[in-house]
Amino acid sequence: MRISHDVHVHTNLSSCSRDPEQTPTNILQKAADLGLRTVGFTDHLWVSDLPGASNWYRPQDENHVLQIRSQLPAEQHSVRVLIGCESEFTGTACGIDAARAEYFDFVLLPCTHFNLLNFVRPEHIVTASEQGALLLERLDQVLDYDFVTGIAHPFVAAHQGHIHDEMCRFLLQSDQLSRCLDKAAEKRISLEITKGYFPQLFGKEDAQFHDESVMPILEKARRAGCLFHFASDAHELRDFGTVLQMQPLADQLCLREEDIHPLFRDPAA
């Protein structure tokens, strides 16, 4: 299969995107220039009447996020546009429900924003094994939400690169990983293959975070029959399109078009 989609893309409607050029118009023009056929916009969301939002999430409600519909350009360059969202799961609260999921073409739900201390990750959870166990617990929980299309960056803990290699080893040794992968495959919930897994591919050197660490996990997921989607998680225009650099990894995993979630498959394939 050829990577033809990027379905985890933020615009400047997300508070963490500070690039004024990160607009639907510019993104879709760049997608056409690069030959991407499908773009999924996924700004951060916490629905206004659901409890548990942080102060950062609270302004990013459904009315704010859905402004993107009015920002879409008339000329979309034959790029298929999907309006999704990236909500949040804290272990005790979820930022979206089934009713509001209907507002979107798809929903990504993360379980690994471990940089959000005492909101997503309790501060006493520190070591690679502790964080790995928490990741698997949260992954199992988010897979219970039937309205979820895919899991955002499920196998990398945000801003925890110093334990990434060790945590991947922990995950691979855990029977709970196999149970989660079987559950994802059975429920047809897509697992994200993200730029964030591969620092060396994108020019970063890190003695404790290597590209190859996540590959056995992705291979195990493929063997379990899981579905996938590709993502840049771009917050700046310069990062959009980086999914195409992951093509050799897709080839290494022997992914086929049928291994991609049906919503995100190349419409021309």
Image (cartoon, rainbow, N blue to C red):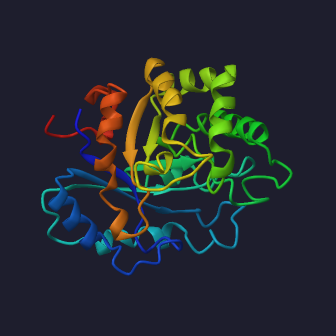
Examine the rendered structure and indicate whether residue 80 appears above or below residue 222. Answer: below
Is residue 267 visible in the rendered image? The answer is: yes
* Residue 217 relative to residue 33: left or right: right
Nearer to the camera, 268 or 194: 194
Query: Where residue 25 appears, x then y in whole percent?
Result: 24, 72
Q: Is residue 117 left or right of residue 34?
A: right
| Horizontal side, residue 220 vs residue 116: left or right | left
Instruction: Judge whether 180 appears above or below 151 on screen.
Output: above
Residue that lies at the very extreme toward the bottom in this rendered image: 20
Residue 73 vertical position relative to residue 213 in the rendered view, above or below? below
Task: Please name whichever residue, 105 or 176, is drawn nearer the observer in this view of the structure.
Answer: 176
Q: In this orientation, which residue lies closer to the viewer: 201 or 63?
A: 201
Residue drawn where x is 46% and y is 49% of the image: 107
Q: Quadrant of the C terminus?
A: top left
Q: Nearer the viewer, residue 212 or 51?
A: 212
Q: How many numbered marks have been drawn onto this rendered protein structure?
A: 0
Question: Image quadrant for the N terminus?
Answer: top left
Q: Which residue: 15% across, 61% down? A: 33
Q: Is residue 148 visible?
A: no
Residue at (69, 73) in percent of width and height = 55
Judged left or right of residue 233, residue 69 is left
Where is residue 41? Give x, y as percent: 37, 59
Q: Quadrant of residue 2?
A: top left
Furthest-right residue in this view: 124
- Kindly identify the residue that appears in the image at 50 percent across and 22 percent down: 220
Percent x, y for residue 157?
63, 48
At which x and y percent is residue 67?
39, 73
